[in-house]
Amino acid sequence: MSPGRTSMESHAQFWTIVAGVVALITFLIAISRCGSDSAGNSNPSVPTASASGNVNPAPTGDGTTPAPASLAGAVTRFLSTRSLNDGQALPDEVASVNGFPSVREGPQDIRGVTYSRNVTFGLVCTDSSDKFLEYNLGGYFDRFTAVVGISDISKSRKYHFEVETDDRRVVNLTLLRGQSKKLSIPVANVLRLRLSACSIDESPILEDRTGGVFGDAAVTGSSAKVPSALPTS
C-alpha cells in the first residue's frame, strides 16, 4: 500500500469520527433545550399535584381558584334550645327532640368571646333532672362544630361536657373556668346527636342564666343532602 493512499484513508477516518462527535453533541443540546422549555413553560390551566399528592384545582377564567367540592354548597344549621314541641325553632336551626336545657335564651361569653347562638346547661352533675339535648340529624349532615367552655359569669369552677353520636360517646371532657376547646366531629350518616354538660362544682345547684356552654353549636352538610326546610314543630 502506498503512503499516499494510507494518508487519505486516515484523513477520512478522522473526519468520520469528527462528524459523529458533532452529531452526538447536537443531539444532547437539543434534548437539554427541550427539558428546559418543559420546565419553564408549564401550562397554568393543567392541574398540578401538591406535595401531599392531592391535585390542586385549575384556576378559573377570572384567576380565582374554585372551592373544593367538599366545601362547595355547604349548608349550616345551628342547634337550637327549642324543641319540636315548642314550634319556635328558626329556619336555620335544628330543633331538639329530647332533653331539656336549664338555660334557654341569651348570649354567653367564653373567655371574652360572645356566642349569641349557644346551647348552655346549668345543673350540677348530681341533679337527677335532664342535663342534655338530643337532635335528630337524619343522616343529612357531615360535621358538628362548637366551642365549649364555662361562661365567664358562671359561679361554677368546673364543668363536664359530653357529646354522643348514635349512642357512641365521642367527647368526654372536663374544663375549668377560663378554659375552652374547639370541637369538630364527623357526623356523616349519624341519626342522633346528643349534647350534655353539668357542673362538677356542687356550690351552684342551678344556674338559670349561665353555665357550661356549647358556643356556635352547628352541623354542616352538602346542599345536595340537607333538606331546604327541616321540621321545626
Image: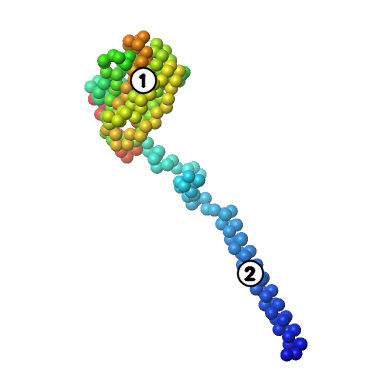
* Residue 74 x, y percent position in the rendering: 37, 36
Measuring from the top left, give residue 161's x and y in whole percent. 36, 22
Q: Kindly identify the residue that appears in the image at 71 percent across and 84 percent down.
A: 9
Crowding near pointer 1: few (<14 within 10 Å), some, many (20+)?
Answer: many
Q: Is residue 12 left or right of residue 209?
A: right
Where does label 2 land, which residue?
24
Which colouring convention does the figure follow? Answer: rainbow
Q: Residue at x 25, y 23 (%)?
A: 98
- Taking the spot 36% from the left edge, 15% from the top edge, the residue there is 200
Under circle 2, the secondary element is helix
Q: Residues within 10 Å of mark 2 (few under 14, many from 20)?
A: few
Q: Is residue 58 visible?
A: no
Q: Amino acid at mark 2?
A: Leu
Q: Quadrant of residue 160?
A: top left
SS under mark 1: strand
Q: Nearer the viewer, mark 2 or mark 1?
A: 1
Q: Which residue is mark 1?
A: 160
Which image quadrant is residue 130 in? Answer: top left
Q: Position of residue 153 (x, y in %)?
A: 42, 13
Give, as a three-letter code, the residue at label 1: His
Q: Is residue 177 left or right of residue 189?
A: right
Q: Quadrant of the N terminus?
A: bottom right
